[in-house]
Image: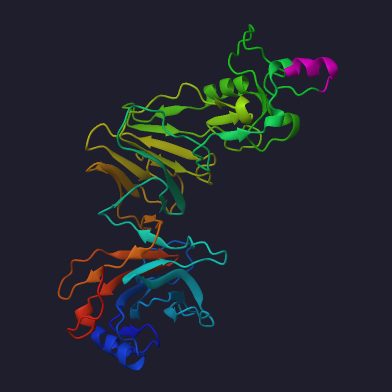
Amino acid sequence: MASQWECGVCGESFCERNLVTLHLRSEHSLTGVPFAQLEATTWSRDSHGLFDTEGVDKHQHQRLVVPVLSEPVRLCRDGSDKVKVSLGRHRLPSGTTSLHAQLKQSMSRPMIEPSPSTHGRPSRAMWQRVSTDGCQLKVGDVFKVGRYTVVVSQVCLTGEPQVPKLQALEYHDNPVSVSACLCMPASACEQNQTQSESAPSCRICLEAALEADSDSEVQGDPTLIQAPCSCKGSTGVVHISCLEHWLSFRYGLVDLREDGQYLSFKPPCCEICKTELPVEVSVGSGPDAHQASLLRGLPQVRPPFIVLSMPKSKATPYGQSLIFAPSHSDAVLKIGRSAGAELRVADDVSVSRIHATVALTEGTFVLKDNGAKFQTLIQPTGPLLLTPLQTGSDKCVETKLQIGRTVLDVKLIDERDASGGKRIVTHS
């Protein structure tokens, strides 16, 4: 570990942290502002967004003291893998790469947040490390195990039994709309059939329309629609009832442990274009619009439960969702590449055998890292307030961030410690 402290503004080295704060106030005229200590550890090899916690001999360590101003203090990394800062809205120093994170003070509250991208939206490069103490999960959270992302698509803690929200990759709150111009009732299809031999026909049953009261083996909604996938032309035309009947044989919930606690769901997929299909569609528009379910017979799950979804990837070519509904306090959901993991990512060395766990703790679902080589990460949904590091005390809530192959441990220096006993700023 680095033994010296550096000034985050000019890079000058000091043997004690207090000397750096005195230097910042006297040489850089930074009085009346809070300071943060920043411990940076950079892995020396290109890691594709991973950080090897075990490769200690390949790490470069730094300890810096950085001012927290009302203007953004942007973090960057130079060609020698050293972390630098850029004050205000000036350009980054030549030869440096942005770490997409910045310190700032808003309403007298020091914080660290993702820096805006070129489009004005917050960058998604900044991740918070999940410790063995865990962090609470909520709807919309995104966390990483190795190179793979997991999305929290639903958290239900109380209420009546219900069918979990199992939707397409976009996780729409409303059913996916089907183009109204291709929605053809049975009567219209029959009229077209008599007028032209080129009338649209279902790619499954090859019929132009199905009567709801016919003797067909397939019963259900006879509406002819353009399938909600990437298939175009006649290949994409299908009856709702035919698509529903076909999907019912191939997709559904699988009880992994046969105890009702771990329900795996493989999202329905078009067998031609491999596009993931929604669970429910909205047919037509206006007053005649109606909703139609493409997956029937999905069981209701009693709360509390959480739905975790993994997008399509090399390890999960069709995506994967898992409903965790613990029936007792000792139930734990395991995530990893082991055969004993309920949410499994096989054949990828970036994922540990048991990489992380999810458990219901005191009424909330908590994600915990299991000591993985590439630590579990969660994406912050907003600015992270910095916690003061009290003098003479080791008790402090860590703000550990990972940006590519650099890990930042950021803490706010105690006000009296930075000013020689004089209080310089008041926090609300």
Inspect the magenta stretch and tell me whether residue 195 lies in it.
yes
Q: Position of residue 175 (x, y in %)?
A: 54, 34
Residue positioned most to the left: 392
Q: Which residues are magenta?
A: 188-198
Up the image or down, 331 lies above or below 132; here it is above
Q: On the rendered structure, is 197 left or right of 116?
A: right
Quarter where residue 416 is shown: bottom left
Up the image or down, 347 lies above or below 217; here it is below
Q: On the rendered structure, is 72 left or right of 412?
A: right
In this view, the residue in front, 165 or 191, is 191
**Magenta region, main secondary structure:** helix
Q: Position of residue 227 (x, y in %)?
A: 65, 31
Quarter where residue 130 is shown: bottom left
Q: Position of residue 35 (x, y in %)?
A: 30, 78
Q: Quadrant of the N terminus?
A: bottom left
Q: Position of residue 181 (x, y in %)?
A: 71, 30
Residue 167 seen anywhere in this rendered image of the structure = yes
Residue 53 seen anywhere in this rendered image of the structure = no
Up the image or down, 285 lies above or below 205; here it is below
Q: On the rendered structure, is 70 left or right of 185?
A: left
Inspect the magenta stretch and tell me whether residue 381 lies in it.
no
